[in-house]
Image (tube, helix red, strand yellow):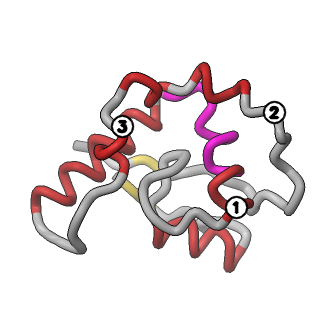
């Protein structure tokens, strides 16, 4: 399976997310099992496959950017949000970009 480069130019700034959450109605994950986006465990093939499956849902989502912005703004530490896992969001917050980092 090929990998793609996540193209997030910079971290969302505080206040960037509207209090209007209507975008959630268009989310690709709205009919998925929420547990898919919160893998349990730190390693292992099953966890990696679950993360890949969750990110695949995000990859086809028309509102992944809004989801990611909300997760960054509110400091969501667990789970897959907007196609990024915990470590990727920390890097995005710390550096302002993912600097071409490849993810599944």
Q: On the image, numbered disc 3 is attached to which residue?
A: 56
Q: On the image, numbered disc 1 is attached to which residue?
A: 74
Q: Is 56 a magenta residue?
A: no
In the rendered image, residue 55, in percent from the top left (x then y), is placed at: 38, 44
In the rendered image, residue 92, in percent from the top left (x then y), is placed at: 63, 68
Q: Residue at x 65, y 67 (%)?
A: 75
- Give the quarter of the image for residue 95: bottom right
Q: Residue at x 40, y 57 (%)?
A: 103
Task: Please name which of the two marks, 3 or 2, marks the residue nearer to the observer.
Answer: 2
- Give the quarter of the image for residue 48: bottom left
Rounded to the nearest angstrom, the CA distance separating label 2 from label 1 is: 14 Å
Q: Earlier in the sequence, mark 3 or mark 2?
A: 2
What stretch of residues is rendered in magenta? 61-69
Rounded to the nearest angstrom, the CA distance separating label 3 from label 1 is: 23 Å
Asked if 24 appears above or below 56 in the picture, the reply is above
Asked if 62 appears above or below 67 in the picture, the reply is above
In the rendered image, residue 28, in percent from the top left (x then y), is placed at: 47, 25
Q: Are marks 3 and 2 in contact (CB under 8 Å)?
A: no
Residue at the left extreme, as displayed: 45
Task: Please name which of the two marks, 3 or 1, marks the residue nearer to the observer.
Answer: 1
Q: On the image, numbered disc 2 is attached to which residue?
A: 20
In the image, taking residue 4 as reference, residue 91 lies left or right, namely right
In the image, taking residue 31 as reference, residue 8 lies left or right, namely right
């Amino acid at each position: 399976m090929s990998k793609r480069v996540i193209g997030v130019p910079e971290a969302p700034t505080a206040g960037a997310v509207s209090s209007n959450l209507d975008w959630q109605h268009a989310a690709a994950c709205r009919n998925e099992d929420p547990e898919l986006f919160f893998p349990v465990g730190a390693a292992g093939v099953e966890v990696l496959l679950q993360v890949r499956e969750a990110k695949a849902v995000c990859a086809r989502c028309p509102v992944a950017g809004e989801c990611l912005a909300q997760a960054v703004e509110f400091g969501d530490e667990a789970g897959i949000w907007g196609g990024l896992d915990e470590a990727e969001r920390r890097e995005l917050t710390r550096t302002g970009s993912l600097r071409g980092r490849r993810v599944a």
